[in-house]
Image (tube, helix red, strand yellow):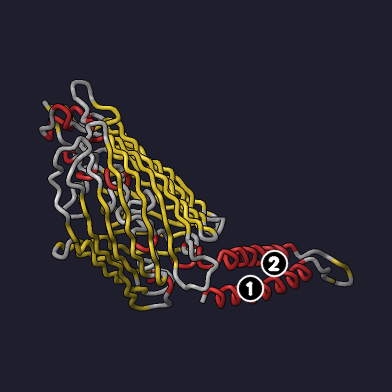
């Protein structure tokens, strides 16, 4: 199959190259107007645009199966979630799911019993339901069953597309931060589990009610949303994840602004920045004084896939104001307090060792390194729990018999200054459609 794909890509590349030559010649051929030669600037501009599009197509065909994002994702969503954008009108159905087996070491770093029990979890089963009314209006939603018995509305929104490059969006929205919060279908990321950074600092899966705008072109994409703020009283020593309101009768005394800008002009590359800021006190007072508790999160991210190589990296930070007041409202003392500053990062690399062979599968051995500290700084009078400074080293392999199905297995080494880290190995079976 790979040899046939290579041959097909080669024929298509040759045909496109011939067309480029024809268009190049016609673009600069003289045009006679009333007996004289005059340039037609609009015509030349249109031909240059077509040449640029053809050049991108040649690059994409040269990279072959490695380019996933260019063809299968739309407007910040994964392949399954963005299917509704690819139909002319009517109903769209998609989905994804994953089963996760976790096997924990019997001992912690310090040699004491870990007390952890192995588990096999029907982690997620998802159905995407969308409806495209016409070229301007569409509805999209994700209904999720977690752990076999918990049902959630993951997102549900309406789009109003004023043009191909600009639209408005409202409903329950995925916060546009990080690499996984929007693109969380198992076959589109390596690792049997989502990164710790994107659970504790970027609280994936993070969705709130709101509205905003989105847009872009072949080179960039962007999103800006106004969303109900997280609830700061539910933050803790291990990060801001507890503050998610998930759209359920969400407190909306405070709102947060989330924004993202990505560069996508190079086939196989996604690189960008994202940020969020909003108060989290929701008009609570402490001894007659309002508590704001402003949360600011930022991240820089990159995902690059080319000729079998798959690289991912992310750095994210967060700061929380008035943590002493939030701690008091939540009843947190000592080393259980909310960090005033948090920082996390990870790097990950994999390579398809079957690329270039006659085997029509993908096999990615991968390695990863991650470090997360959710109490990098704390308020005066509060202690630091050394267990919140986490380092995770991963060694794994991912097998994709077809692009929509993945089997991932990895060994994770967990460590922290408190010597309470527990190593584990995991197996994840995932799919999307």
Which residue is nearer to you in this view: 398 or 140? Answer: 398
For this orientation, the residue located farthest to the front is 111
Instruction: Classify 10 Å Cα crowding around label 2: few (below 14), some (14-19), many (20 and above).
Output: some
Q: Residue 22: x and y, percent?
A: 75, 73
Going 26% across and 67% down the picture, which residue do you hit?
Answer: 126
For this orientation, the residue located farthest to the right is 35
Which residue is nearer to you in this view: 155 or 112? Answer: 112
Location of residue 287 (image quadrant): top left
Q: Residue 320: x and y, percent?
A: 27, 33
Residue tagged by mark 2? 47
Q: Are marks 1 and 2 in contact (CB under 8 Å)?
A: no
Instruction: Classify 10 Å Cα crowding around label 1: few (below 14), some (14-19), many (20 and above).
Output: some
Going 22% across and 61% down the picture, which residue do you hit?
Answer: 123
Q: Please, what secondary structure does the residue beneath circle 1 have?
A: helix
Which residue is nearer to you in this view: 93 or 394? Answer: 394
Going 37% across and 73% down the picture, which residue do you hit?
Answer: 132
Q: Which mark is residue 421?
A: none
Q: Residue 36: x and y, percent?
A: 88, 68
| Viewer-side label of 1, 2 | 1
Which badge, 1 or 2, comes first in the chain's sequence?
1
Location of residue 90 (image quadrant): bottom left
Q: Is residue 237 visible?
A: no
Q: Which mark is residue 10?
A: 1
Q: Is residue 376 visible?
A: yes
269 sits left or right of 325 in the view: right
């Amino acid at each position: 199959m790979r040899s046939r794909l290579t041959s097909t890509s080669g024929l298509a590349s040759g045909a496109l190259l011939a067309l480029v030559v024809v268009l190049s010649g016609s673009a600069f051929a003289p045009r006679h107007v009333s007996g004289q030669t005059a340039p037609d600037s609009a015509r030349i501009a249109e031909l240059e645009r077509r040449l640029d599009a053809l050049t991108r197509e040649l690059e994409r065909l040269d990279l072959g199966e490695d380019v996933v994002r260019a063809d299968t994702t739309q407007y910040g969503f994964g392949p399954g979630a963005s299917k509704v954008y690819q139909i002319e009108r009517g109903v769209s159905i998609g989905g994804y799911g994953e089963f996760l087996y976790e096997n924990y070491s019997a001992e912690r770093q310090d040699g004491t019993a870990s007390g952890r029990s192995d588990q096999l979890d029907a982690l997620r089963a998802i159905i995407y339901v969308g409806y495209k009314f016409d070229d301007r209006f569409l509805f999209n939603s994700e209904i999720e069953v977690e752990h076999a018995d918990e049902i959630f509305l993951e997102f549900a929104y309406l789009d109003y597309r004023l043009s191909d490059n600009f639209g408005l969006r409202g409903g329950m929205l995925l916060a546009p931060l990080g690499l996984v919060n929007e693109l969380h279908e198992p076959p589109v990321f390596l690792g049997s589990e989502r990164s710790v950074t994107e659970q504790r600092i970027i609280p994936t899966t993070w969705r709130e009610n709101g509205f905003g705008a989105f847009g872009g072109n072949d080179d960039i994409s962007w999103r800006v949303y106004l969303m109900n703020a997280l609830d700061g009283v539910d933050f803790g020593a291990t990060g801001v994840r507890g503050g998610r309101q998930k759209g359920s009768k969400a407190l909306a005394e405070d709102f947060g602004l989330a924004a993202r800008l990505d560069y996508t002009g190079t086939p196989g590359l996604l690189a960008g920045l994202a940020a969020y800021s909003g108060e989290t006190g929701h008009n609570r007072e402490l001894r007659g004084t309002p508590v704001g508790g402003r949360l600011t999160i930022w991240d820089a991210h990159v995902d690059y896939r080319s000729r079998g190589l798959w690289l991912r990296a992310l750095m994210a930070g967060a700061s929380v104001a008035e943590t002493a007041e939030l701690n008091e409202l939540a009843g947190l003392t000592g080393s259980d307090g909310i960090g005033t500053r948090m920082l996390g990062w990870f790097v990950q690399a994999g390579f398809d060792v079957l690329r270039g062979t006659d085997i029509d599968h993908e096999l990615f051995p991968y390695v990863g390194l991650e470090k997360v500290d959710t109490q990098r700084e704390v308020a005066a009078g509060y202690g630091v729990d050394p267990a919140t400074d986490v380092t995770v080293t991963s060694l794994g392999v991912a097998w994709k018999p077809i692009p929509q199905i993945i089997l991932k297995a990895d060994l994770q080494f967990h460590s922290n200054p408190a010597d309470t880290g527990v190593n584990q190995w995991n197996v994840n079976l995932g799919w999307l459609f």
